[in-house]
Image (cartoon, rainbow, N blue to C red):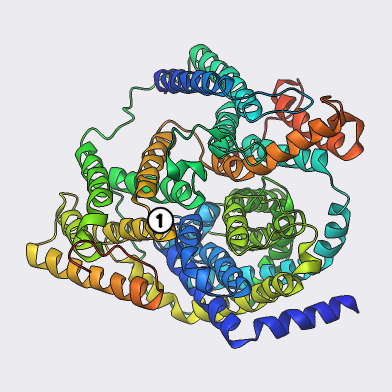
Amino acid sequence: MELLSNLGMAFVIIFQPDNLFFCFLGCLIGTLIGVLPGLGPVATISLLLPATFHITPVSAIIMLAGIYYGAMYGGSITSILVNIPGEAASVVTCLDGYQMARQGRAGPALGMSAFASFVAGTVATILIMLVAPPLARVALKFGPPEYFALMLLGLTILSYLASGSVVKALMMACVGVFIGTIGTDTISGVERFTYRSYTLMDGLGLVPVIMGLFGISEILLNIDQASKQEIYGTRIANLLPTLRDWKISLPAIFRGTLIGFFLGILPGGGVVIASFAAYAVEKKVSKHPEKFGSGVIEGVAAPEAANNSASQGAFIPLLTLGIPSNVVMAVLLGALLIHNIKPGPLLLKDHPTLFWGIVGSMYIGNFMLLVLNVPLIGMWVKLLKVPYPVLFPLIILFCLIGVYSINNNTFELIIMILFGMLGYLMKKFAYEGAPMILAFVLSPMLENALRQSLIMSHGSFSIFFTRPIPCALFVISILLLISPLIPGVKKRPKIEDVT
Amino acid sequence: MKKYDQMSSGIWLLFAVYICVESVRLPLGSFRDPGPGFLPLLVGILLGVLSLISFLQAHSDESLESSESWYPRKRWKNLVWVLVAQLAYAGILDTLGFLVSTFLLLVFLFRSNLAPRSWPWAIGGSLIASVSCYVVFEILLRTQLPKGFLGF
């Protein structure tokens, strides 16, 4: 009964005209940047953060969330038609989606991808309604040691699942924690690593760092590679998959949804891992695994469902524990804090309209994406034809304006450019940016939790091992880290292994 | 890649040393009451240890040998141009104001040798783009863009 009344509240909030408008705007912008190369959801959400200062927090978060799952869908359009994933989460969709397009079945591939995302989004929304409230009640019992162990586990999982070396990923997490400590220490008021810069006294801004690492560096890489895109030229007709397609895809969609949802909740998990895991599972359960990669429709349906439900599942740790499980959630955490809302176990009680507004917006947003994408595919394809040399100066300009408009400070532009160069070099030398950003955002919380835990225990680290929850989380972290050294344990899953 | 991995690990090791040296200069506190230098020092030590492991891994791995250069030998000038343009923009934005600086930046980037557009195209395109951004950000979104000495 409680569930129904909550659902009712969710719909009342989302059907308010301005919320509906911002949800639509978010989905539209999300699809747009998902289609266009060079600006991902992380950079876009950061870019639009200042623009949300003038609207209510509920509308702001609804729009920013719409960008996130809209980008997931937009990314799959480029994967299928151009074989270039607009987003990392759509890499797997390329494998079978592009092959389907080459066989003249681009329509059903695009259609199935939209339907799979819609079904997954709907199921994930229902799962959020079921899982979030009990989790928030459990989280109320969490103290500093529990939070510290949970954040550490998130960083460990993210590093463990990194596509490159685990050691390098952990190094980036350390750098992230360090750059998060720059600024005035909140407990003692001592300035750290600021060198008397007024800008640095408040700490490094989230937006310049993210825009640099994920926006500017991406542009530099694209200029460097000067990629040529070839759009699949056939006319896209008949977006509706056949009955046979549906029969094959439905079980795949449900498996993908469940896998995606639980990997999305997992701290450090996220959409990329979810889509790869769903593809791997489909390949394993299939009667004809050898056909994967040659254009089978379940190879499109499962990862598309998984990345959509993972992007929604990821809201659970943010909204109930106040801990972002991936980089996009980290930016959304920043957005909530700017709007004076502290996500955590009390969010559901203190700001029910925000929580249920987001849940409602996901439901309606998925419907909007379906309506937006199926008939508008032609327009998105046209957009893909804009040459990159015309596009990149505009993307650079948006990044510059976005960063400047937060504090009207040109020093932050320089910080962004420096992090852009760092991000470019990191990609070249195979270091991942995601652990750094997540650690950067978690750093102040991590430090407070560590210091409070040690004060509570009078300086003894045993507090992390005598309480059951932190002890279990620590054991999982340690097992993950030493697992490659244990004989007989299978190699850690790597993205390349799936393909 | 081996050479580059060793090189990058070495740089991170130096960075770790920097973090440790600077953290020690801050009040470290005690385990009972950790001070502001406590976490940075901990992270610095951890980064140092990890950089050493990464260095040794690269040293012992024979399969990583590759002759590929990490920077684009042909296109590095483009990268430098784009970076210089952005830095220059940050330098002139407050003085020249949003409209003039943005116009200059866009003309410069559209004319860069990545795929240069014709002069009329570059000037026309830059004018339209900078004025549209001004309208959207300054007038519609009420973002405060710098005016500069010309007043716009």
Residue occupying image coordinates x 14% and y 55% = B111
**Residue A100 shows up from this direction:** no
Viewer-closest of B59 and A325: A325
Relative to A112, residue A438 above or below: above
Residue occupying image coordinates x 25% and y 55% = B93
Expressed as whole percent of the image width and height from the top left, the position of residue B48 reads: 56, 19
Expressed as whole percent of the image width and height from the top left, the position of residue B37 reads: 62, 27
Left or right, residue A424 beside residue A269: left
> How many marks on residues?
1
Viewer-closest of A279 and A13: A13
**Residue A419 shows up from this direction:** yes
Viewer-closest of A179 and A275: A179
Q: Quadrant of the N terminus of chain A?
A: bottom right
Q: Hey, which residue is sitting farthest front in the picture?
A: A189
- The image quarter containing residue A491 is top right
Relative to B39, residue A289 above or below: below
Q: Quadrant of the C terminus of chain A?
A: top right
Residue occupying image coordinates x 55% and y 66% = A64
Expressed as whole percent of the image width and height from the top left, the position of residue B12 reads: 48, 23
Judged from the image, the secondary structure of the residue bearing numbered disc 1 is helix
Left or right, residue A183 beside residue B73: right
Expressed as whole percent of the image width and height from the top left, the position of residue A430 reads: 47, 33
Relative to A393, residue A457 above or below: above
Residue occupying image coordinates x 35% and y 60% = A401
Q: Dot 1 corresponds to which residue?
A: A403
What's under tag 1, amino acid-wise?
Answer: Val
Viewer-closest of A481 and A287: A481
Relative to A407, residue A461 above or below: above
Q: Hey, which residue is sitting farthest left in the picture?
A: B119
Q: Residues within 10 Å of mark 1 (few under 14, many from 20)?
A: many
**Which chain is home to disc 1?**
A
